[in-house]
Amino acid sequence: MRGMRILLSCLIACSLAFAAIFTAGCSRTPDDTLRLTLKIPRTGHDVIFDESITQVDQVMEIMVQDFEKAYDRPVDITVQVFEQNQYDSAVADVFDTPDAPDILYGDYFNMSTYIHSGRVVPLDDVVTPQVRQSVFDCLWDMSTIQGHVYMMPYLGRQNVLAYNKELFRQAGLSRFIKDGIQSWTLEEWEQVLDTLAKNLPTGSFPMMMYARSSQGDTHIMTLLRACGSDFFSEDGHFALSTPEGVAALRWIQEGVDRGWFPPHAENLEIEDCSSLFRSGQLAIYMVNNASIGRYEDTIGLVNFPDGEGEGCATTFISGFEVFDNGDPEKVQVAKDFLAHVYNSEELMAYAAGMLPASQAAAEQYGDDILLFDEFLENRKNVVDFTGSNPDTRAIREIFHKRMYDLLIGHTTPEETARLLDEECNQAIDEGVASSTLHE
């Protein structure tokens, strides 16, 4: 009997030992894998050295696979793509649900709103001296709020205006066709637009204009600098109730009667104007350094008007945020993912095709990026189109509706300026009051 007890004890011990060995050997089973979600809006993307890449989510998949292979524990990061006009439904509307993002890649002007929800974690520990030095210094200013880095810049797209060379020739404006990124005085702008309105064939129109939705409204905001307005006050509030701001609103409203825009532009989307431009029916439209290649030599470039003749441009920065969804382990792995990306020259180089945040990528591939030096030089003309607004998306919903009323003639330039200042500044103040930053 005693022998049986000894034998049973040995069997139990061996079983426990085997179980321990089995468990240790299977520590990377699917049940032990830490799963994260990286969300990204559907965005076209070109890479100088890889023509197979046409969408930015393909780059994210490369980053994820590289990180998962290198990481010291099993991790599975799922890349989810959403449409550009669905930021809130993909992010804020799913907080505290299993579908909440752990990492978000997107445009700063859309992403910055979420920082003030208190869900986005500071990334100062990811931004080592080496990482900070590897990225163009000016991009860190846009990524920092109250001394902490909340967004990691990956690439930029500089926005200017493009003109259809053939339509300019047909209208008798060949003298305005030049190489590089031009800047025209306001007098020259009016001369160009009036000439186009007079001489373009039926069914073609001088310049973009739209106000049906908030999509693309940042470009219309930039046009409101046409008469010298800074658009924002020193503290980042709307400041259009000035002689310069009202003059720009009048400039646009009068442009309706002067035939500068497609008919009933208040009912158009930016995509409608894009379609007209691609089909050769619109003479002037917004482009950026990433989109000019599709037009080859059919377009020329000019800055937005600024009233001084120097012109202005805007820059859209895209990069990453990390969200705290209540799991510190996931937050750390998300940070480790960004550290992996930003310490890899190879992964940072996949931004080459746009304006890469990485100085090494810019140096290596700058000569191959279309008009890279021209856009780099034009950075001196870039203006801020967000101010200190903690809720950019709320502002945009107000802005396009007021521009709709202006274009249709329901409000005067003075009334539009006053309403924009009052309503947008109220939204800014409400955003500041409700802002919560993650510590």
Image (tube, helix red, strand yellow):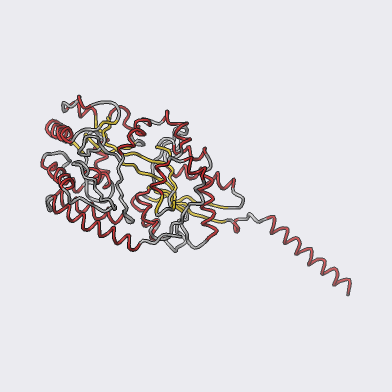
User: Measured along the vertical axis of the image, is residue 380 above or below residue 296?
Assistant: below
Q: Which residue lies at the image location 88% right of the left edge and 74% below the top edge?
A: 2
**Label total for image:** 0
- The quarter of the picture where residue 204 lies is top left
Judge from the rendering whether residue 288 lies leftward or rightward of residue 307; answer left or right: right
Q: Which residue lies at the image location 44% right of the left edge and 64% below the top edge?
A: 96
- The quarter of the picture where residue 372 lies is top left
Residue 78: image x %, image y %?
Answer: 50, 51
In terms of depth relative to the viewer, which is nearer, 384 or 279?
Answer: 384
**Most distant residue in the front direction:** 234
Residue 289: image x %, image y %?
Answer: 35, 35
In terms of depth relative to the viewer, which is nearer, 391 or 37?
Answer: 391
In terms of depth relative to the viewer, which is nearer, 203 or 353?
Answer: 353
User: Measured along the vertical axis of the image, is residue 97 above or below residue 412?
Assistant: below
Residue 188: image x %, image y %?
Answer: 17, 32
In terms of depth relative to the viewer, which is nearer, 437 or 41?
Answer: 437
Judge from the rendering whether residue 73 lies leftward or rightward of residue 99; answer left or right: right
User: Measured along the vertical axis of the image, is residue 405 above or below residue 195?
Assistant: below
Residue 409: image x %, image y %?
Answer: 12, 50
User: Measured along the vertical axis of the image, is residue 436 above or below residue 197?
Assistant: below
Q: Which residue lies at the image location 26% right of the left edge and 26% below the top edge?
A: 178
Judge from the rendering whether residue 229 lies leftward or rightward of residue 292; answer left or right: left
Quadrant of the image containing the N terminus: bottom right
